[in-house]
Amino acid sequence: MRAVDKVELKQLIVEGPNAAAVVSYDYVNPSGGRLHQDDAEVWQVENGLIVSLTIYFDITEFRSFMGR
């Protein structure tokens, strides 16, 4: 995504084929504004392949920031 300026892994928990992470994102919108958000990501892996990824974040704030 072009709007992502920086990504930082804050916390990672792995249990068997599942992982949960807190990830910090810094975004830049087309007019140069900046937004920081932390999100939660839930990963599921089978046979060494990612089969599911669910990301939880404030979509309303992100859409407003991006002008949508």
Image (cartoon, grey):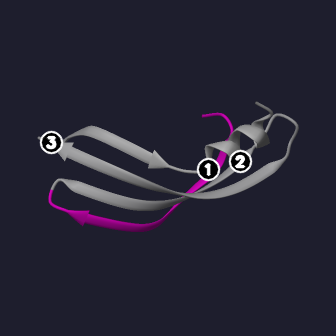
Q: Are marks 2 and 1 in contact (CB under 8 Å)?
A: yes
Residue at x 79% of width, y 51% of height = 34
> Helix, strand or loop at disc 2?
helix
Q: Earlier in the sequence, mark 1 or mark 3?
A: 3
Instruction: Give residue 67's position: percent from left, percent from top.
Output: 80, 33
Question: Which label belongs to residue 58?
Answer: 1
The C terminus - image quarter: top right
- Is 3 drawn above or below residue 11 in the view shown? above
Q: CA distance from mark 2 to mark 1?
A: 6 Å
Q: Which residue is mark 3?
A: 46
Q: CA distance from mark 3 to mark 2?
A: 33 Å
| Residue type at numbered disc 2 | Glu
| Residue type at numbered disc 1 | Asp
Residue farthest to the right? 31
Image quadrant where residue 2 sits = top right
Instruction: Give residue 21's position: percent from left, percent from top.
Output: 40, 61
> Helix, strand or loop at disc 3?
strand
- Is 15 drawn above or below residue 52 in the view shown? below
Question: Which label belongs to residue 61?
Answer: 2
Instruction: Please tell me how crowded label 3 is: few (under 14), some (14-19), or many (20+) other residues with Cα within 10 Å.
Output: few
Residue at x 14% of width, y 60% of height = 16
Which residues are drawn in magenta?
1-16
Residue at x 17% of width, y 53% of height = 17
